[in-house]
Amino acid sequence: MALDGMTDETLPRQAMRAEFLDAETEAELARAWRDNRDEQALHRLVTAYMRLAISMASKFRRYGAPMNDLIQEASLGLMKAADKFDPERGVRFSTYAVWWIKASIQEFVMRNWSMVRTGSTSSQKALFFNMRRVQAQLTREAQQEGEQLDAMQLRQRVAEVIGVPLADVEMMEGRLSGSDFSLNATQSSEDEGREWVDTLEDDGASPEETVADSHDGQTMKVWLGEAMGRLTDREAYIVRERRLIEDPRTLESLGEELGLSKERIRQLEAQAFGKMRKSLETHQGEVQSFFV
């Protein structure tokens, strides 16, 4: 891998000693990795820009995450950038990598800010990383104009400046001002006080639902087996390869293997589904009973 041999302690030192790449060399290395999966080229490209990743990681220290963790996340973002970079677009790698590095660090910070996930939508990210700064700026500007903003006015202006719904501002404000506490803490000081975790509703399936789901699942497997049994060997093979494996085959690849056109494979697939549908229709009443 590109960062093999680098530890948390040696990574910053090696990054500071790394070479500076010109645009031509950078593009050659990117092509070597893209076209030939040349790991030496990837290592050289990533190492040259680790100083950029470390510099960006340092800007997020105020969120309380360990610097080593931030650097590791920045390096992951750098690796993603190197893997997706297209040198033919005429953009410098550093310009392209900045977005991936920042996104990787922000995701890490938000995951670790609270035990309760802060959020991952674009508006939530914008609020998480900008709300305090915008609040302070708006407050200063209002004071300079002799205006006193109440809490609601400030929230409304923050929403306008950042371009997010007011409800998102209110939600993020509550999350950032709150603190985590253990669900194993008791609700009272009494020895036998109930823990907060005991008040949470179990959203899992009930034992009755679990048994019913298991029974219905087994029944459906039997019916599908019967339907598959009505197919020819070739039809069954196409259905399995197209629908029942983790990485489904394309019509074109199956056609090449079976010596048939892509259109013929599509016809055989449709024909097989028609047979299976007729088989399952014989159980129509029983299927409907599952959902009553």
Image: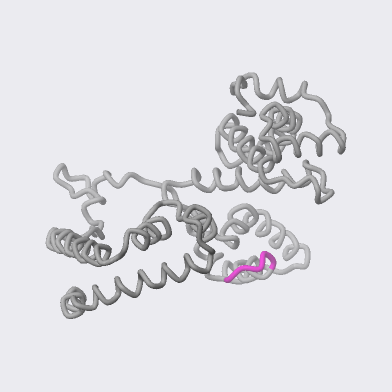
Q: Residue at x 47, y 68 (%)?
A: 266
Quadrant for the C terminus in the image: bottom left
Q: Position of residue 42 (x, y in %)?
A: 69, 32
Outermost residue, front direction? 259
Q: Position of residue 270 (x, y in %)?
A: 41, 72
Q: Nearer the viewer, residue 41 or 55?
A: 41
Q: In the rendered picture of this protein, how many numbered marks are placed on residues?
A: 0
Q: Residue at x 27, y 77 (%)?
A: 278
> Image quadrant of residue 72?
top right
Q: Nearer the viewer, residue 258 or 80?
A: 258
Q: Residue at x 24, y 59 (%)?
A: 201
Q: Is residue 193 left or right of residue 60?
A: left
**What is the basis of the colouring in this image?**
one colour
Q: Which residues are magenta?
A: 161-165
Q: Position of residue 142 (x, y in %)?
A: 73, 65
Q: Nearer the viewer, residue 239 or 57?
A: 239
Quadrant for the N terminus in the image: top right
In the rendered image, the vertical position of residue 207 relative to residue 263, given as above or below = above
> Image quadrant of residue 283?
bottom left
Q: Residue at x 37, y 57 (%)?
A: 237
Q: Position of residue 172 (x, y in %)?
A: 52, 59
Please tell me whether residue 42 belongs to the stretch shown in magenta: no
Examine the residues drawn in magenta and state their main secondary structure.
loop
Q: Nearer the viewer, residue 119 or 244?
A: 244
